[in-house]
Image (cartoon, rainbow, N blue to C red):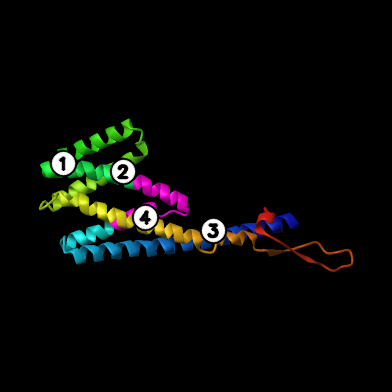
Amino acid sequence: MNSIMRRTGGTSVRSERHTDQAISHGVLLAVCCLLSYKIIIVLLTVSRFVPRDDELLGGMWAVVATIFVFRRCYEESANAALMRASATLFSFGLCLIYLLIFPFRPWGMVALIAIGAIVLEAIGRSEDVITACITTAVVLVVAGISPEHAWKQPILRLMDTIVGIVVGILGAWIAQRLPRLSSLSNTPFPVPREPNHDGTSRRTYHSADEAN
């Protein structure tokens, strides 16, 4: 009976801890996304470099980069940032060279996707293939939607990506230094015990870890 109650109490604490972690992670991610969106919108607005549509696109791109990079662990965020940055730089390089010479064409897009995938696989960066190919497709399609100065798109999207990555990394760094919600696992909770021989009962406190 006691073991069942301990197990039930430990499960309850773990469930509570998981809920707290999920809420804090979601809220902090949302704040980081809003911050990256606002930063890039302000930068593009002040520069007067692009029309309103491109400002909104830049905000979306920065948010996507933040979501991609922001992880529960700072080390994981740093690794994700490196992967995102390397794949993005490679893709933007291909797109910039292409758009300086040719306008957007579907055959050009699929050719760059094929080239990017082949090169990345050949140099042992297969984990970057998906990100690079998605980036290539989006940049070229956007360049097709706004054909005037299409070559600017890779440069603008690179700036958006940098802002999103920096904010995501900063958010992960802050999250790691906030009070650890995982400390809830060490919070004692009461577990009823069997009555003593004299008819009295005593209550012993156990941590969630002990309950396991």
Chief secondary structure of the magenta portion: helix
Label 4, residues with CA under 10 Å away: few <14, some 14-19, many ≥20: some
Q: Is residue 130 above or below residue 14?
A: above
Give the residue type at disc 3.
His
Q: Earlier in the sequence, mark 3 or mark 4?
A: 3
Give the mark, 1 or 3, whose residue is nearer the N terminus: 3
Kind of residue at disc 2 = Ala
Please give the label number shown on residue 67. 4
SS at circle 2? helix
Q: Quadrant of residue 57?
A: bottom left
Crowding at mark 3 (Cα within 10 Å: few <14, some 14-19, many 20+): some
Residue 134 in view in this figure: no
The residue tagged 1 is 98
Q: Which amino acid type corresponds to the residue marked 4 in the rendered image?
A: Ile
Kindly identify which residue carries mark 3: 18
Q: Quadrant of the N terminus?
A: bottom right
Residue stretch rendered in magenta on the structure: 62-84
Within the magenta stretch, is there residue 107? no
Does the residue at mark 3 contact the one at mark 4 (Cβ under 8 Å)? no
- What residue is drawn where x is 18% and y is 48%? 141
Residue tagged by mark 2?
Answer: 87
Furthest residue to the right? 198
